[in-house]
Image (spheres, grey):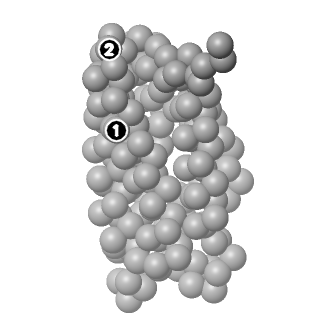
Amino acid sequence: MNRAPTTRSRSPFALTSAAVGLAAVAGTVGTDVTSRWYRHLDKPPWQPPGWAFGAAWTTLYAMLAWAGGRALVRSPDRRGRRRYLRAYAANLVLNSAWTWVFFRAERPRLAAVESAVLTASTVDLTRRTWRLDPAGGAALLPYGAWVLFATALTGKIARRNPRSD
């Protein structure tokens, strides 16, 4: 008798990789560095070059998928996995939403607030992951550092462009 795969038989790494992949695609679609609005923003001199964002996010997304998969494997029960997945999904939604608020809505101040919420979510996700798997939690530390940096950068852009919101 052939049975449909259960949640337990699906790879947690496939699940987290798919979720992170969807977030990456959503974020990429929302990004528009060629828009007239973005090109004319006054950006701080410490903003990294454009190529650095793609390189950083590719690495961070891979680490996020790996850490999430490890945490799910080590989660002791179904209820704990559901709670972890809710926090993981919320973080990915916040992650993708930033590009839409910043680039598409052209609201740097609101994007700075959204990024601060993403930073808090990332700290929470790192804490949850660390409790389940210290190696996975450690793998999220660069993600947290990058998100914190992005929050500072977004805030600085918002302050330098008060009329852009």
Amino acid carrying mark 1 in the image? Arg
Residue 2 drawn at (x, y percent): 66, 17
Instruction: From the viewer's perspective, tell me whether residue 86 is left or right of residue 40.
Output: left
Residue farthest front in this picture: 1
Q: Disc 1 vs disc 2: which is toward the camera? A: 2
Q: Say which of 31 and 5 sits in front.
A: 5
Q: Residue 55: horizontal and vertical position, in percent?
A: 68, 44
Residue 54, percent from left and from top: 67, 50
Query: Which of 10/111 is in front?
Result: 10
Residue 152, placed above or below residue 109: above
Residue at image point 65% right, 13% down? 1
**Alpha-carbon distance for marks 1 and 2?**
14 Å
Tell which residue pokes out farthest to the bottom in this image: 163
Up/down of 141 relative to 92, above or below: above
Which corner quadrant holds the C terminus? Answer: bottom left
Q: Is residue 152 above or below residue 122?
A: below
Q: Residues within 10 Å of mark 1 (few under 14, many from 20)?
A: few
Q: Is 143 left, or right, of 65 in this rendering?
A: left
Decide: is 117 above or below 142: below
Residue corresponding to mark 2: 77
Sequence-earlier tag: 1 or 2: 2
Q: Any mark on residue 86, and which?
A: 1
Give SS at disc 2: loop
Task: Identify the residue at horizontal 56%, vertical 41% (top origin).
Answer: 20
Can the viewer see residue 114?
Answer: yes
